[in-house]
Amino acid sequence: MPATGDPSAEPPVGVGPALADVLPSVATSLGVPWSAGDGTAYVGFEMPPTRRAVVVLVDALGYELLLRRAGHAPWLRAHLPQTRRVTSGFPSTTATSMGTFGTGLAAGVHGLLGYEVLVPGTDRLLNELSWEYGPDPRTWQPHETVFEAVARAGIDVVRTGPAFFDGSGLTNAAVRGGRFVAAESLAARVDATLAAVRSSPRLLVHLYWGDLDKVGHVAGCDSWQFGDELEAIDRELARLAAGLPVDCSLTVTADHGMVEVPHHLRVDVAEEPTLATGVRHVTGEARAPQLYVGAGAEDDVHAAWTELLGDRALVRRRDEAVAAGWFGPVLPENLPRIGDVVVAMRGRNAVVDSRRARPELLALVGLHGSLSDDEVAVPVVHVPAASVA
């Protein structure tokens, strides 16, 4: 999304194939019908039938990033001609995207609506990544996940990731179902995946890897460190593909992309008093702040942020953002979780709040959360059964 042009222009949101389609399409290929939620037949990606399936989610492997850094990833590069480009949704942040991935639903339906959101009826924020002192995740996100549906159909479901994911709030909200196998290194997770596949004739395995996101945040997504991490991931993906039996498909996707934001392009709420006036909480990603305001302050806050940020951001009242489809369809019970004012940063800009953000967060180079192609476009690499190589 360019920083210039009509600042009022709405980017296309919720149009075309989406991250929400990935797991339902895999489930369908396993013979588990998926409901579109309104009684109509689900239409996702066309994936040939398979008896076993592996789905890998690489945190921050954006589609545009993959195109630019494909020289570091020969296995992924070889599959680029068949790679689908899909959108992760808004905000393009891990908690929201994992909810979309795990449930096959839009953010406004599953209700995981940001990195940090207000708990309705309280003045308390919920960090949906850490889930510290959070509500019951199964109540916060009550919809059946695709993993639960596949397990209910009698197919083994295995999820592998770091040990602290097992039983965590976000895991139980977004990707619950089946059993969890803890493994720390990527190689260990690939080994665990291959062992699981060999142990069952009918199986769905999900492997999560988060270190590309960590490297991109700290060193930047254009850095040599990002390239090195991508090379390591690509080697393990190639080893995984080579080790799968012929009746097992492999799908690789991501939750969001990333952009590098120079520090001189960051606006700090602590240094701009007009941005703090009337605002109770500034939450969410620096690329997609959500503002919870005092009673009657919505118009003034909207006007102040619009005036100061100008064409650096799209600033919308909650009802405007919802009407524009930023969150997809929104259930009434989820509306209060969305900020009274929602901001989508344009270009390479961001808004931080040094009054409450930890120094290590303020120091991050790579950011995500907004509506740019670099942030919302993610790849879907699908290698059908009998062709995994």
Image (cartoon, grey):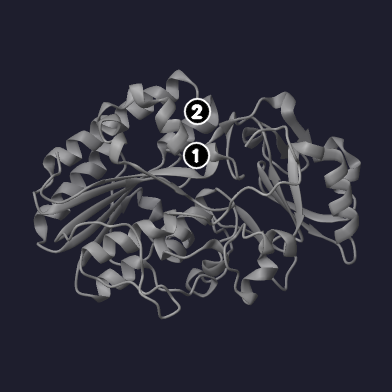
Is 142 left or right of 71, judged from the image as shown? right
Residue matched to label 2: 221
In the rendered image, the vertical position of residue 19 relative to residue 179, given as above or below: above
Secondary structure category for the residue under label 2: loop
Is 76 left or right of 142, judged from the image as shown? left
- At x 51%, y 67%, the residue is 110
Is 139 left or right of 66, judged from the image as shown? right
Q: Residues within 10 Å of mark 2 (few under 14, many from 20)?
A: many
- Tell me whether circle 1 and circle 2 mark residues in contact (CB < 8 Å): yes
Q: Residues within 10 Å of mark 1 (few under 14, many from 20)?
A: many
Residue matched to label 1: 257
First reached walking from the N terminus: tag 1 or tag 2: 2
Q: Amino acid at mark 1?
A: Gly
Label for residue 217? Answer: none
- At x 15%, y 53%, the residue is 248
Question: In the rendered image, which quarter contains the C terminus?
Answer: top left
Question: In the rendered image, which quarter contains the N terminus?
Answer: top right
Disc tally is 2
In the rendered image, the vertical position of residue 289 relative to residue 186, given as above or below: below
Secondary structure category for the residue under label 1: loop
Q: Nearer the viewer, residue 71 or 243?
A: 71
* Extreme residue toward the bottom, this view: 39
Residue 173: image x %, image y %? 46, 65
- At x 58%, y 53%, the residue is 13
Residue 249: image x %, image y %? 19, 51
Distance, label 1 to label 2, CA atoms, is 9 Å
Residue 246: image x %, image y %? 8, 49
